[in-house]
Image (cartoon, rainbow, N blue to C red):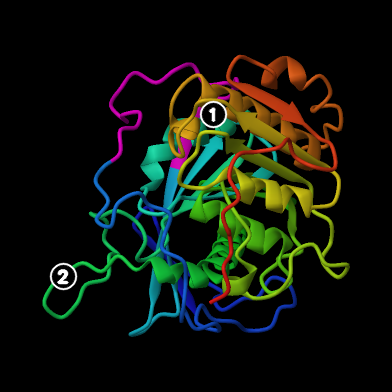
Amino acid sequence: MALLVAAGVWYAAIGHSELSNGSPSTTTTRAPATLPAPRSTTTAPAPRTTTSSSAAAPQAIGTFKVTTARLTLVEDPGPSQRSLPTTIWFPVVAGRRPLLVFSQGFWEPVSTYQTLLTDWASAGFVVAAPTYPHTTRPPHPYTRSTPTGTTVVDGKDIVNHPADLRFVIQSVLDYAAQRGNALFGRIDPSAIGLVGHSDGGDVSLAVAADSADLTPRVKAVAVLSGAELANYFGGTYYTPTVPAVPLLAVQSRTDTVNYPSCSVQLYDGAPQPKWYLELAGASHLGGYTTAPWRTVVAQVVTRFFEAELAHEPTAMQGISSVADTSVSTISNGPTAPAQPGTPTCDAAP
């Protein structure tokens, strides 16, 4: 059983659900024995310079008014419980809309990306963004502590995030199916997309395309400066038994945290349809929080999901008029443009 809090009301949701086959699952099926260091430029990360939530917000790219709901999802109630507070941005418009579930990067609060998430909601998507346990910058109420009170930031916890993400998808759908709440009747359960940045991109790709973690309900995925981590999540990407999921990969040539070759690897291995949006001059985080890159990303991601989820197959036609700019280019060939650097993106444990 899983518990959910929304607007101060306790709500019971079905927990331990495995979306791929309905069988029980938990978040601890794979031991976090060995992982690469989280993609952070410091061992004790200092706050990065990002767009401030108090700054004047730029004009949203869509036309819908946006409102929010906040849910508290509790997975595995008991001593080992995992709490995933989830904020949902959604358009004030009648009818069922596609659902995008966004996964944050390591050590970045969801609020870092709020302009981008609001943009997608203003364009007509319901956007759910969970806060993953143990890898998010405090303060938040679910930071794990040692007996002496020391905060633990556990980068190895990423091995549990694919199961967390599957749980969030199911819980949001369950909540939206209950009468009397803000999301009732607003989500199309047949139109689910994943989008994530950095480690969140790794997790999104695993649930969309890795045989060990995939959720067949996912119909498209956008990976923002991410990588394959098959040696840590298990399974194999893009095997014949894994349904082909449309992919949008976004990567800056000047990213020194997630190397461009990692995005090339995941893109080149993916089947069509797929798109590669290359940013010029953006940092690992700045490409998604700072104009002009953020604006391009918001527009391209919107049109990608409109094409794949919102029954608008022509949405990507003429995308070069949006994406081919002084700071970005887009392509959809079998291989990505050549990129600098040849690091190992998924070293064996």
Q: Position of residue 11 (x, y in %)?
A: 45, 66
Q: Secondary structure at mark 1?
A: helix
Q: Is residue 244 above or below residue 222?
A: below
Q: Position of residue 241 (x, y in %)?
A: 86, 70
Q: Position of residue 196 (x, y in %)?
A: 56, 48
- Is residue 8 in view from this perspective? yes
Looking at the image, residue 319 sits to the left or right of residue 180; the answer is: right
- Chief secondary structure of the magenta portion: loop
Tell me whether the residue at label 1 lies in contact with that at label 2, contact meaning CB atoms closer than 8 angstroms: no
Looking at the image, residue 177 sits to the left or right of residue 68; the answer is: right
Q: Secondary structure at mark 2?
A: loop
- The three-letter code of the residue at mark 1 reads Asp
Within the magenta stretch, is there residue 167?
no
Q: Residue at 67%, 29% (x, y): give it.
A: 300
* Residue, disc 2: 150
Q: Which residues are magenta?
A: 48-68
**What label does residue 140 carry, if any?**
none
- The three-letter code of the residue at mark 2 reads Thr
